[in-house]
Every structure is written in structure tokens, then in C-alpha cells.
Image (tube, rainbow, N blue to C red):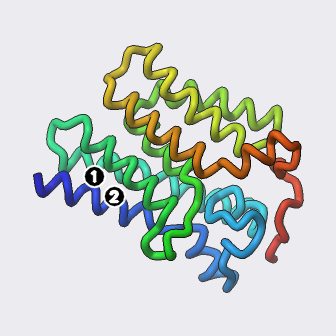
Amino acid sequence: MILPFIAVVVSYLLGSVSFSVIYAKLFKGIDIRKHGSGNAGATNTLRVLGIGPAILVLALDVLKGIAAVWIGKWLGGDSVWVPAICGVSAIAGHNWPIYFHFRGGKGVATAIGVLATLCFLPALYAGIIAILTIVVTRYVSLGSLVFVTLTPISLVIMDRPWPLFWTSLIICVFAYWRHRSNIVKIIKGQENKLGSKGGKHVA
């Protein structure tokens, strides 16, 4: 039991590495959580720092999720639950990072890495629809919610193992909770669209 426990803890600590905060602090000398939307994630990095840093942060956040699942696979033996819990733990770390006073991002990029590693095809199908949603509406938050909503539905339709469904459902709940202010803004028509000047760009 000690190895699975270690895997979960390590995954949380890995998830707590907030690359947007680190990049903004190292290269711009700012706390990105005090700029733009105040979120420590790739979308706010795009608004505040530009496309290059945003792509880097997005890739690293996705890799955190992938790495967490593999840590669970390596240390969890044949268990389906350990990699899944490690993935959730990494997302929790991203959302509530121990290194940064528990003020993190919304966990979608890390969730992409987790779900793509646990259940590639269901996540891919959900991701395609999510990307189309973002292209049409230019709401990244709406596309993110579409992704986490459709993944558990895809898992049921494709008759995948129930541990994966419950994991994806927990991830979905996390995402809705972290996006609750975005949901209100979307309903009111006040949500920032992709490419809009929602935050002050830091050169």
C-alpha cells in the first residue's frame, strides 16, 4: 500500500508546479495571478504574456497530467484506480498548489493530459467537439466544460471500465467548480473571448 500512496502524493506535488506562475515570475518579474483574469493557467498566460509562453505553459501542464498517470501505472501495479487517482491528484495540485498558497489554475490542461492517457479515444472525441466549440464561440471556458462533460458520456457509450467513468466525472465536477464564475459570465454575455483584450499584455 505504501507505493500507491507515494504515487498519489508525488502526483499532487507534481501538479502543484504552476508553470504559468514560474514563467511569469522568472521572465517578467510578475505574479500572473494579479494580471488578466487572475488565473494561473495557459489561457491567462496567452492574454498577459502572449502566444509563445502560453503554448509552453499549456504543453507543460498537459505533460503533468500524463506523467501523473504513468507514475500511478508504475507504482500501482495492476490497479486501475491508482493511475486514475494519481491523475485526479495532479489536477488537484494544479488547482490548489501547495507551493503557491493553494492559488492555482482551473486544471483543464492537466485534465487533458490525464484523460488522454487514461482513455485516449473517448477524450479525443470529446476534445474534437470542444475545439470546434472554441472555434465557433471563441469561449475557451465553454470548450473546456464541453470537453469534461462529453468525456464521461463517451466512456459510457464506448463501454469503458467504470473506474475511468468515475474518475472523469470527478474531473468534470472539479472543472465546473473552478469555472463557476465563467459560467455566470457566459450566461450574462460578459465572458472574455479568445483573442480579445481581456487582460493587459505584459511585453
* 199 or 178, nearer to the observer: 178
Hey, what amino acid is under mark 1? Answer: Ile
Q: Which residue is mark 2?
A: 11
Q: Residues within 10 Å of mark 1 (few under 14, many from 20)?
A: many
Location of residue 106 by image quarter = bottom right
Is 169 on the left-hand or right-hand side of 42?
left
> Height in image: 64 above or below 202?
above
Residue 133, given in percent of the width and then of the height, sits at 74, 32
x 34%, y 58%: residue: 11
Count of marks, rendered view: 2
> Height in image: 81 above or below 96?
above
Location of residue 143 by image quarter = top right
Residue 38, given in percent of the width and then of the height, sits at 70, 67
- Extreme residue toward the bottom, this view: 29
Q: Secondary structure at mark 1?
A: helix
Is 67 on the left-hand or right-hand side of 103?
left
x 62%, y 60%: residue: 41
Quadrant that contains the C terminus? bottom right
Disc 2 or disc 1, which is closer to the eye? 2
Residue 168, given in percent of the width and then of the height, sits at 44, 35
* 195 or 104, nearer to the observer: 104
* 94 or 182, nearer to the observer: 182
Q: Residues within 10 Å of mark 2 (few under 14, many from 20)?
A: many
Q: What whole-number distance in Å separates the C-alpha atoms at marks 2 and 1?
A: 7 Å
Identify the mark at residue 71; answer none if there is no mark. 1
